[in-house]
Amino acid sequence: MSGKELDDMTLEKIIKLILQDVLCTILIVVKLFHQGAIEVTQSSTCHDIVYQWQ
């Protein structure tokens, strides 16, 4: 593997992680608006919120 290929893979992973974070944040905000802040606690992980929201 060349350094360039490695950079591309790393960049792709980083972009995917950032996109996941952004989607999670949007879902959390939407959930807040729909159901009120009480249900969304700091201990809720992104996955939990996505799962509950579906």
Image (spheres, grey):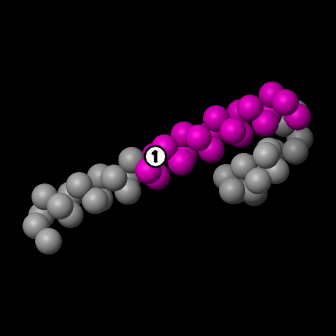
Between 51 and 41, the residue placed more toward the observer is 51
Predominant SS of the magenta segment: helix
Q: Residue at x 74, y 32 (%)?
A: 30
Residue corresponding to mark 1: 18
Q: Which region shows up in magenta?
A: 16-35
Residue 38: % across, % down = 89, 41
Q: Would residue 41 be visible to someone looking at this image?
A: no
Q: Residue at x 72, y 49 (%)?
A: 50
For residue 4, side relative to residue 31 (left or right): left
Magenta stretch contains residue 19: yes
Q: Residue furthest bottom?
A: 1
Q: Residue at x 84, y 36 (%)?
A: 37
Image quarter of residue 33:
top right
For residue 24, side relative to residue 54 (left or right): left
Residue 25: % across, % down = 62, 39
Q: Residue furthest left?
A: 2
Image quarter of residue 40:
top right
Amino acid type, label 1: Ile
Q: SS at mark 1? A: helix
Q: Residue at x 59, y 41 (%)?
A: 23
For residue 36, side relative to residue 10 (left or right): right
The image quadrant where one finds the N terminus is bottom left
